[in-house]
Structures are given as structure tokens and as C-alpha cells.
Image (tube, helix red, strand yellow):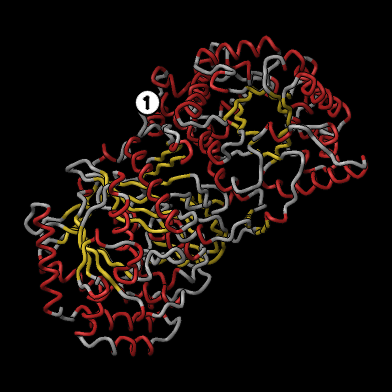
Amino acid sequence: MKSTSLILNLNEVGMQDLEIVGGKNASLGEMIQNLSKLGIAIPGGFIITVKAYRDFISYNKLDQIIPELIAEMKEDDIESLGLTGKKIRTLIENGSFPVELSQQIAHAYQALSDHHGQFNVDVAVRSSATAEDLPDASFAGQQETYLNICGEAALLVAIRNCFASLFTDRALSYRENLNFDHFQIGLSVCIQKMVRSDLAASGVAFSLDTESGFREAIIINASYGLGELIVQGAVSPDEFIVFKPALKKGFHALIEKKLGNKNRKMVYGKTKEERVKTITVEPAAQEIFCISDEMALQLSKWILLIEDHYSAKKGAWCPMDIEWAVDGISGELFIVQARPETVHSRKKTGMITEYSISDKCREEKVILKGIAVGDKIAGGKVHILKDLKAGEIHLADFRKGDILVTDMTDPDWEPIMKHSAAIITNKGGRTCHAAIVAREMGVPAIVGCGNATAILQNGQLITASCAEGDAGIVYEGLIPFEKQEFDLSELPETMTPLMLNVASPDTAFHYSHFPNKGVGLAREEFIINNYINVHPMALLRHRQLNDPELSNKINSLIRGFKNEEAFFIDKLSYGIARIGAAFYPNKVIVRFSDFKSNEYMNLLGGKYFEPTEENPMIGWRGASRYYSAEYKEAFGLECKAIKKVREEMGLDNIIVMIPFCRTPKELQRVYEVMEEYGLKRGENGLEVYLMAELPSNIILAEQFAAHIDGFSIGSNDLTQLVLGLDRDSSLVAHLYDERNEAVKSMISSVIRTAKRMGVKVGICGQGPSDFPDFAKFLVEEGIDTISVTPDSFFKTVQAIYEIENKLSIENEEPLIKEDRWLSVV
């Protein structure tokens, strides 16, 4: 019977055996039994069962001593916890194996060596606790793993050390927090054939976005060598994001990838004393992604299968946290661990918590930036920890509410991490130890800052913000911020569909949870300015400019990409795709770039390609650029990016919008260029909208409508041009008002024409959010959609709902708006 066995093969167990072999081993066996036949490769091995661990404890007469030591431990006392843990670990490490157990281990190890045709096969020795990898508590990283163990003697030492690691300071602290009985938890050990990722790459992956909880994304982190450095936070890994629905349909669904700073890797050591070592990665290898796009997609397909299996077994969605490795000898991909994700899967659904900073001058207070973990904001005093050895945690004098700043966190620091207001590290990525622990504890963390310990000083007051997208930002001083909670179940449903204006791809997954009907405006210029950082023509022609400094900067930007053109197309397509994926299958209206010449001038290399205009606001912008000899080639890159998103990545919910198009003839010229670069209205379902922001768009609306699928009213530019004022001028700012009767007359006219011509019409702007009377006007006119910024979404929903109710009462009948929903779903 399994429960009385001391040794079991991995392929003999499954999730039903958790109490016998622990969470990690049960999961590995589950996959080998059920997923190997689907083509997923999992390294084999054998298990030291929980019974074997308990026999070891009993044989060394520790079953009475350990509970007594734990009973004497003072709760929430770091020093007491550290002393207790050290005593227990020493007792276990000095223990002896029962003869029968040591003989069975030797026999199983010999059999594994014979199977792989190796003398003293190299194995990973991993702890697997009975309370580990549970759906409601991960216990991730609580026990130890030992890599590249060879030989029976070294194996026995590693197993004994695994037993002892059940009582590390971090494990004791973690169980105290969750009220787990320390001695009721058993430990099993997995002895698994090593995957030679020291000669290739390895990493971790999640079947959801770890920051927002967006469930349709797969996040992959990858680095060279053995995977321990990613978990430790010693490197900033490459990151890949894959969109599940498109992957399932067979598309090349890689919607983003970012090159990490992989300057070190862990490899096999060359002596018995040094089983593994960390070395520097060759400079050329640092400049490229450590796995191919094809391998990232293969891994993603496996992740889908794993998630589907565990979800079916659980009877509910079960997002997964997975470790993977590539064997550098065979080139094969392996899954080496899989556990249920335990942060977002436990969150209460239907609740949205928003953190925001209203300080308009905060840009002046930015000290440094890193990778945001979570979406919270916290302020406090800096407490820098460095050179703190194991067992010295009680010497830190860390006060509750301090902000922990360090090179990278150590797993043994968890007892003080739970008291931190925030965590800031020099190194690490989204899946490093600091990030994992911070998410589980609900503490904001900013990792991979580079030089936080050098810039920040002990006692310094700072604010750590993870509420502004992918970038975590550290501000000088205590910056006031607000926290708002919304219960989506209490949000009324409006008859007028509300869409969102989404500027940053980094925030798109977060806003996907809002009860919206798509994106009414996604601006390409935000992506170009923040993610590409260079004028597109400078990117294409910098080698002809004889500007070495410019060329050096551009060569640095395009690291990891095939060439300059591929860099622009890929980066723009990633930004668009991330927004498109977040709101799929609802429509996402992407506006082609609408920089003014003075804005383009500010981009890297822009001075070589931009004219000096007296009034850029009504100059060379929008459509007039797209067919011009001076910019056509750059517009072609935009078209190629859209084509890639729709046809390669599978995001056919992306539609495009042409801004600042002055005449119907100009519209036709833009269409000719779009078609030249592979985009044709109506082909593969491509829809084209026109930004209705010029008086000519309204006056000639019928002519425009014959060649488009919809209008989106740009009330900002429309107001400026109808009233004849420069909206950038403070001297006439008091006259700027989209509620002016002349502006409203224009809006009424285009809505009527759109209805008559059978094309959609919406509006994207702050007006409906800021002015209820303006929202009332739009609803009365029968606008198809209203698109607002996320920060005003909830108040706008309430305002529109109240307006619709009032109109319904005034009309003494329900307000019905035909196929309004069909325009956005």
C-alpha cells in the first residue's frame, strides 16, 4: 500500500496522494500519468515518502523534542524563531537514516542511473511538503532544492538537508501566519533526473497575468542556465506574453516580448564540493533572447494543456505556476514543476480596487524606477538590508511599516518582509522570490531597479507606487494617494454602451476587468513615444545621417530584434496587441499616429525629419503625413504592425481610425497607401473609422460616410476648430467649451448623418465624464457609444444611467436604442 511505502516512483502517484508524497511530488506524478501521453515531457525519478520522513524523525527520537522546541518558541519574535529553527535543523542534519530506508534509497538511485545509462546520474533533490502547492496556500520556496547531486553519499546528505528545511526560519514564519500546525505537516523528497538547462535556458511561467489576474494571458520568464537565479532575483529575465484565445486558434499569438538583463547564469560546478556555480554570460548572448519565439509558443501550448487538466480535476478554473527547462544536449523542452497559482485565484471576484496619485508635480519627485509587482501604493522610511547572513535576521532592527530596500531578498527574510510597507530591490523580475512573496502578502514591490541601495538612504521618506502600469516608481517624500473600491455587482447597466480610452498597454490587462464594451480610442503615438522612443524615419535612415551618437542609441534600442524595421513593427504590434487582447473580442479602435511636428521633433532623431511650423496644431499632422513622400515609409511600418496584429497574432477585433483627414480625396489617398502596405478596408473584416474632428468632416459627413465604417467624434479638436481658438493657448482657454452651441450643433449634425448613412458614431473624450449635461445631450442625440478614460469610468456609468432613467420617465416609456450593443460586441 502506498501509505506504508518508503520509496515510490514518480509515475505511481497523483494528486490524490498529496498526504503521502506532498504537493510538488503529487503534481509531478499527476502530469506524468495524464499529460505525458499528450506530448508534454516531464523528467522521471523517485520519491522519498512522508512515511520515510516520519520514520527518520522517530528513529532519531526527534518526534518529542521538536514539538517541545516549537512550543517554547515566542510567537512573532524574530530572534526566538531563528534560534528555534536553528536548533531543530541541527538535530535533523546530525540524524542517521534507518538501515532499511538507506538501502531502498540506494537501490532506487541505482535503478535511475541504469535507466539513463549513467554512473551516479545527476539529479535534483527537491523538498515536497504536504501543505505545499495547495489551491489556497502555495508555500512556494519554503523548503530547499539541491541541484546536480551525484552519488549515493551526496544524495543522502541532500535528503537529510531537505528534511531539515521543513524548519527554516521562513517556513516556520509562514506557517505561523497561516495557523498551520508545524508538526502535522509532513515532508517528502523528490529525486528527479536533472535537465541540462545549465547548457541552455530555463524559467517559470504562469497561466495568467501575475499583476492584474487577467486570465487570458500566459506569462513566461526565461534566462540562461539553471532556474535558481530567476527565483532568487539575481537576474532580470526575458519575458514573453502569449494570448490564449488566439493560440488555441492556431495563430502566432506572442503578443509581447521584452529582453532582460541576463548577465549571469548558474551552471554545473566541476568539483564535489561545488555542485553548481554562477558565471558571467557572454556579451553576445546577453544581446539576444535566450529562447526562440517557437519554443515560447510550444511551452504555451503545454501550459494550456496543464491548466485545462487541473481545472477539469478541480471543477473550476485553476491557473498554474509552472517551472520549465530546456536540455542543452538534446534541445528538448521539459516541465519540471507545476502548482496551482494562489494569489489571484483566491481573490474575491467583482471587486475593483483603484489606487491613484493626484499630485500633478510628482514627475519632479521621481527617484528611480523598476518593475511593478502588484498595483498598490505605500509610503514609509527606507531600511536598507545588505550583507545579512542566514541566522542574523534578528539583528536587522526592522520596524513594522519600514520599506525594505536590498540588492535581492533572501528567502530567510520572510519574517521581516511581512512587516514591510513595500519592498524595493536592485535585481529580479516578476517571478523572483521578492515578487512572489510580495504578491502573496499583498505588499507592493518594485524589483529590478538596478541601483536602489546606492540612491536611497536609511531613514529617507519615500513613496513606492505600483499603480501606474508595468513600471514601479519611487518618489521622494510621502506623496498623498487615494484608494477607492468598487463593487461591480452594484454598478448599473446602461443602454448606451461605454468604452474605454486606453493609452498605455501596461495598464490594459488591469482595466479589462471593467464592465466595458471595448476601447474607443487607443493612441499609437503613446506607444511610439514610450516604447519605441525614436522617430520612425530616423530609425530607418540613421545610417545615412553621419551621427554616430544617434546610431549608437538606436543600436542599443534594437537589441534582440532582427533590424530597425522589425524593431518598430514588433514593438508597435506588441503594444497594440496587448490592448487588443485585454478587451478581446470587443472592438478596439486604434488611431494611426497623430503626432504634431513639434512632438515628433522631440523624438530621438526627430530634428532631422521635422519642419518648424508656426502652428503645428493645424499643420502637418494625421492623414496628410501618411501619403507624403517625407513620411509614407514610416506610415507603412504602422500598417505592417496592424496587419501583423490582426493576421499573424489573430486579434481581428482591432480596427483602425484615421485622424485629421481634411477631405474625402485625402481619405482615398490614405487608403491607397494602406493597401500598398497590406491593409485594405473590408479585407479579412478590417473596419476603418474616421476621427470626426474637423468642420469639413461634419459638413461633408455624407461623402466621408460612404467610404468608412464609423465616425469617432474628437471633441477636443472639433471645439478648437469650430470656435477658432488654439487649445494650447492659455490666453483663450476661457473660451474653450465643447458645450458651446456651435460645437453641439456640429455633433448633432454628424450623428444624424451617420444614422442616415448606416454607419456607427461614437465619441471619445472627457466631456461626458466632466459635464452631465453634455452626457445628457449625447444620449438624447442617440450617440452609439461613449468612450471615457478609466479614472472617470465609474462616475460616468452612474451619470449615464441616471440620465437614461430620467429620459425614460420624461418619455413615459422605456428608452430603447435598437442595435447599439452590436456596434461594439
Q: How far across and down, in percent of the image, does residue 644 sit?
A: 47, 26
Q: How far across and down, in percent of the image, does residue 618 sit?
A: 70, 21
Q: How far across and down, in percent of the image, does residue 122 sit?
A: 14, 57
Q: Is residue 407 visible?
A: no
In the rendered image, the vertical position of residue 313 relative to residue 720, given as above or below: below
Q: Is residue 222 visible?
A: yes
In the rendered image, the vertical position of residue 43 relative to residue 49, given as above or below: above
| Image quarter of the N terminus | bottom left
In the rendered image, the vertical position of residue 316 relative to residue 670, given as above or below: below
| Image quarter of the C terminus | top right
Residue kind at label 1, given as amino acid type: Asn
Tag 1, which secondary structure?
A: loop
Residue appearing at x 29%, y 56% in the figure: 228
Q: How far across and down, in percent of the image, does residue 330 sit?
A: 18, 42
In the rendered image, the vertical position of residue 61 relative to residue 177, given as above or below: below
Task: Please indicate whether residue 618 sits to the left or right of residue 578 in the image.
Answer: right
Q: Residues within 10 Å of mark 1 (few under 14, many from 20)?
A: few
Quarter of the view holding residue 764: top right
Residue appearing at x 48%, y 58% in the figure: 445
Quarter of the view holding residue 118: bottom left
Of 246 and 454, the residue lying toward us = 246
Quarter of the view holding residue 278: bottom left
- The residue indicated by pointer 1 is 563
